[in-house]
Image (cartoon, helix red, strand yellow):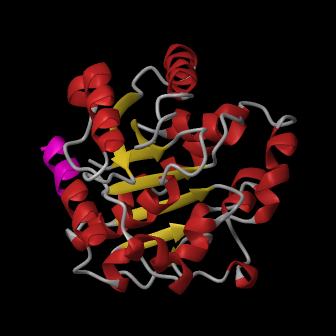
Amino acid sequence: MSKIISLANQKGGVGKTTTSINLAAALAQQKKKVLLVDADPQANASSGLGIEIRDLENTIYECLINGIDPHTAVVQTSVENLYLIPSHIDLVGAEIEMLNIDNRETLLKNILSQVRSEYDYILIDCSPSLGLITVNALTASDSVIIPVQCEFFALEGIAKLLNTIKIIKSKLNPSLQIEGFLLTMYDNRLRLSNQVYEEVKRHFGDLVFNSVISRNVRLSEAPSHGMSVLEYDPQSKGAQNYISLAKELIRRQQ
């Protein structure tokens, strides 16, 4: 049974796209067939996997607005078992265009239902906002992973996201679950990182992943080479962290 997971946090810079790319690559390395959906107009997940957006005819934008067959937008990445529906800057205006479409909150759900049976995991990289496209992503998902940066204002904004999830559960997607909170940019030498981890753990208990993503230079270098960190430096701490996360996620499904 395939699983659709959104990666969401309206706070920017928390490692959402980094996690989307590298968790997708790590799941693919574990012999899972993965589709990554780039639902962020910045299209960083697309370029971070080496996809040249200017050369593409079809993206998630055409699927949402023109109703094209999502199979025509899927591209094979350089990672075996990892496929991508890329994003485009045009997605910025999509939320306005979607206002005229009936059942606009379920557009992405209908799109992914056409390809769902072909993948083990579908990951959706959401934009750092709680707009209509993020609402679409959460409505289409079985669960949501919430990356949380290990810094002073880490928990700021989580209440808003949790409230949005609650509304979507009550109105649009009753089966939506929180898959887990993922601590990113963790540095065990810093007291603050440990304090944030303890506070998130105290608030959310078993919902917090045991795997944490450490601060790692290789992680920030990899996207500029159009690669996941697993391709760029498989021995790096960042690569090992994401392999650990992928294994933990797979164990949860068993």
| Image-based side of 88 in relation to 93, left or right | left
Q: How far across and down, in percent of the image, does residue 8 sit?
A: 51, 42
Check if residue 16 falls in the magenta segment: no
At a point 24% along the width and 54% down the height, the residue shown is 245
| Image-based side of 211 in relation to 226, left or right | left
| Image-based side of 13 in relation to 188, left or right | right
Q: How far across and down, in percent of the image, does residue 159 sit?
A: 52, 21
Specify the principal SS of the magenta part: helix
* Depth check, front residue: 70 or 228: 228
The answer to whether residue 71 is above or below residue 101 is below
Q: How far across and down, in percent of the image, does residue 232 sit?
A: 37, 84
Residue lying farthest top?
170
Q: Which residues are magenta?
A: 247-254
The answer to whether residue 157 is above or below residue 98 is above
At a point 31% along the width and 68% down the height, the residue shown is 238
Q: How far across and down, in percent of the image, does residue 194 sit?
A: 27, 40
How many callouts does the rendering have?
0
Check if residue 252 falls in the magenta segment: yes
The answer to whether residue 161 is above or below residue 181 is above
At a point 20% along the width and 68% down the height, the residue shown is 30
At a point 26% along the width and 30% down the height, the residue shown is 198
